[in-house]
Image (spheres, rainbow, N blue to C red):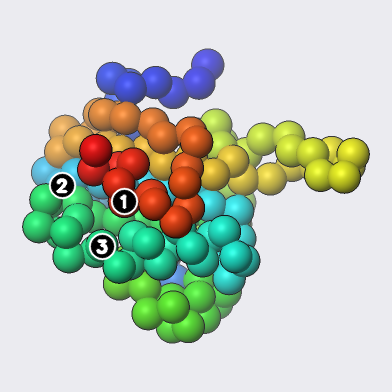
Amino acid sequence: MALQAGDKAPDFKVNDENGNPTSLSDFKGKKIVLFFYPKDSTPGCTAEACNLRDNYDLFKSKGYEILGVSTDSEKSHLKFIEKQSLPFRLLADTEKEIHEKYGTWIEKSMYGRKYMGTNRVTFIIDESGTIENIIEKVKTKDHTAQILE
C-alpha cells in the first residue's frame, strides 16, 4: 500500500553523513522536505541537491528542514556535501530501511536491463508528522518551485 497525502509519515532511525543517528521524530514541530535520490555526485542528483542548496534560506524562512536520503554510505554523503557545499543532512539508508517504509525502492529498467533502485520522490511532511504532499515527477533543476508552489 503506497503512502498518500494525509498519511502519517513513517518514523525511521538511520545515520546521517557524520554517523549521528537521525530519526523523523527528531524534527517534531518542523516541516520536512524528505527527498529520495538515487546516487551521490551523479548529474541529476547533483542538480537536485544544488537547487535545494541555492534556495536553502528560503526553505528555512518558511520553517522547513531538508533531509536527503539515498542508499549511499556516510562517507559518500560527506564527500557529496563537502564538494557541493550542501547545508542540509544526508541520511545513509544503506539497509534500505527508509526506502522500504516509504515505498521508494523499486524495480527500474535501463537499456532493457531490470534492476532495483531508488525512485526519485520527495515527501513534504508537516509539523505534526503528516504527509502533506508527494512529488513523484521531480524536476531536478527546478525542485524548489515544485515544493513551494
Q: Tell me where residue 20 appears, x and y as whole percent.
A: 37, 68
Please tell me which of labels 1 and 2 falls first in the chain: 2
Residue 100 in the figure: left or right of residue 53: right
Name the residue that disc number 1 marks. 144
Residue at the location (48% across, 33% down)? 136
- Residue 10, compared with residue 20, is above or below; it is above
Q: CA distance from mark 3 to mark 2?
A: 17 Å
Tag 1 and tag 2, C-beta contact below 8 Å: no
Q: Is residue 68 above or below residue 32?
A: below
Residue at x 16%, y 33% (from the top left corner) = 128
* SS assignment at label 2: loop
Relative to 27, is 43 on the left or the right?
Answer: right
The residue that label 2 is drawn on is 30
- Residue at far right of view: 112
User: Dividing the image into 4 quarters, which one contains the C terminus?
Assistant: top left
Q: CA distance from mark 1 to mark 2?
A: 18 Å
In the displayed structure image, the side of residue 109 where residue 27 appears, left or right: left
Residue occupied by mark 3: 55
Query: Relative to 46, is 110 above or below?
Result: above
At numbered mark 3, what does the secondary structure look like: helix, strand or loop?
A: loop
Q: Position of residue 101 (x, y in %)?
A: 49, 34
Q: Residue flagged by tag 2: what amino acid is it?
A: Lys
Tell me which label, 3 or 2, sits earlier in the chain.
2
